[in-house]
Each structure stands twice: as structure tokens, then as C-alpha cells.
Image (cartoon, grey):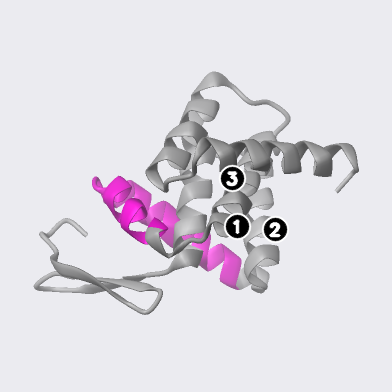
């Protein structure tokens, strides 16, 4: 969406952004998908392992079939590529997330980072920035790290 939006608004849990030529509707599912893609692209490349992990995480979290998860991730990737003001969109959408949702998102971001077996500084910086964009506090991030490591060491 390259045109100037006309009064973005929330209708329930949906963020509606209209321009003179189109209307875009975003929800929490889109927000999570976009954050995962944003983090996965932190090192410049989304590996096949990261893609598979994102599909699985989104499908499991939102109870979606694989085709729906793929469509959601594809939409998120396209939006990231063509929307220079994605940070603002994600910031607006984050207002619909509870603290529990934010912790879940942080754990998912960590799982995506670990999917290809390597995590570099650029990816960690993207995860930190993504957390900041959606208002994940230090306390929530700490809880997410604890949960991630507990799940990892318990083989989940």
C-alpha cells in the first residue's frame, strides 16, 4: 500500500486501512506472521527450515490448515516487501495483543530464529526490534526466554 491511508481504524480486532483505491484488513494472525517473517529475514535470508517452522508455528497457534498458514505467510512477506511503514502498522496492531499473546509471539520468534541451527547478531537484533515495535516488555521477554529454554530442554 503506497498511497496515504484515510483514517486507519479498528473494527473489533481488525485494523482497517483504506486508501482512495483499496482497503486492507489486518488482524492478529497477520501481525504474528509479519513479526515472524521480519525476524526470519534478520540475516537477509529466510531458510527453508525457518519457513517450515513458521508454517508449523502459525498453523499450531491459530489452528490453521497448512494452506491457510502458507497464504498468511505469503501475505506477510508481500506486505513487508512493499510497505515502507510496516513498523507503524505492526505498532497499531500490537494494541490488540494481551501480555500472554505477546509472550507467545516472543517464544515463536525464538523458535524461528533457532530453526536453521544458527542465530546471528542481525537476527537477534531483528527480534529485539520486533519486540520493541509491538511493546514486548523486558519482563515478558524474560518470561518468554524462560519458557523457550524450558520447552527446548524438555524436548518440545
Q: Is residue 117 left or right of residue 91?
A: right
Q: Is residue 143 above or below residue 91?
A: above
Residue 20: quadrant of the picture = bottom left
x, y (%) of residue 78? 38, 55
Q: Image point 57% across, 58% down: which residue?
A: 101
Q: Residue furthest top?
A: 121
Q: Identify the main secondary structure in magenta.
A: helix
Q: Which residue is mark 3?
A: 106
Q: Nearer the viewer, mark 3 or mark 1?
A: 1
Specify which label sits upstream in the sequence, 3 or 1: 1
Would you say the residues marked 2 and 3 are in contact, meaning their CB atoms lie under 8 Å apart?
A: no
On the rendered image, what quadrant is the N terminus found in? bottom left
Q: CA distance from mark 3 to mark 1?
A: 10 Å
Specify which label sits upstream in the sequence, 2 or 3: 2
x, y (%) of residue 69? 59, 66
x, y (%) of residue 98? 51, 61
**Which circle marks residue 56 in the picture?**
2
Q: Image point 78% across, 36% down: which residue?
A: 149
Secondary-structure class at tag 1: helix
Please report the bounds of the magenta region as a residue range: 68-94
Secondary-structure class at tag 3: helix
Residue 71 falls within the magenta-colored stretch: yes
Q: Which residue is mark 1?
A: 100
Specify which label sits upstream in the sequence, 1 or 2: 2
Q: Can residue 44 be seen here? A: no
How many badges with numbers are in the image?
3
Q: Image point 68% across, 36% down: which residue?
A: 145
Residue placed most toward the observer, 151 or 47:
151
Q: CA distance from mark 1 to mark 2?
A: 20 Å
Q: Is residue 105 above or below residue 150?
A: below
x, y (%) of residue 66? 66, 68
Amino acid at each position: 500500500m503506497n498511497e496515504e491511508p484515510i483514517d486507519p481504524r479498528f473494527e473489533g480486532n481488525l485494523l482497517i486501512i483504506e486508501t482512495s483505491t483499496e482497503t486492507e484488513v489486518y488482524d492478529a494472525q497477520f501481525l504474528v506472521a509479519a513479526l515472524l517473517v521480519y525476524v526470519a529475514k534478520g540475516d537477509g535470508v529466510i531458510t527453508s527450515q525457518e519457513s517450515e517452522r513458521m508454517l508449523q508455528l502459525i498453523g499450531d497457534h491459530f489452528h490453521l490448515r497448512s494452506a491457510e498458514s502458507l497464504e498468511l505467510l505469503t501475505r506477510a512477506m508481500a506486505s513487508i516487501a512493499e510497505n515502507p511503514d510496516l513498523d507503524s502498522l505492526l505498532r497499531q496492531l500490537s494494541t490488540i495483543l494481551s501480555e500472554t499473546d505477546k509472550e507467545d509471539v516472543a517464544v515463536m520468534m525464538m523458535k524461528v530464529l533457532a530453526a536453521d541451527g544458527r542465530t546471528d547478531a542481525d537476527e537477534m537484533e531483528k527480534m529485539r526490534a520486533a519486540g520493541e515495535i509491538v511493546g514486548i516488555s523486558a519482563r515478558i521477554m524474560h518470561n518468554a526466554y524462560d519458557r523457550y529454554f524450558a520447552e527446548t530442554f524438555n524436548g518440545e
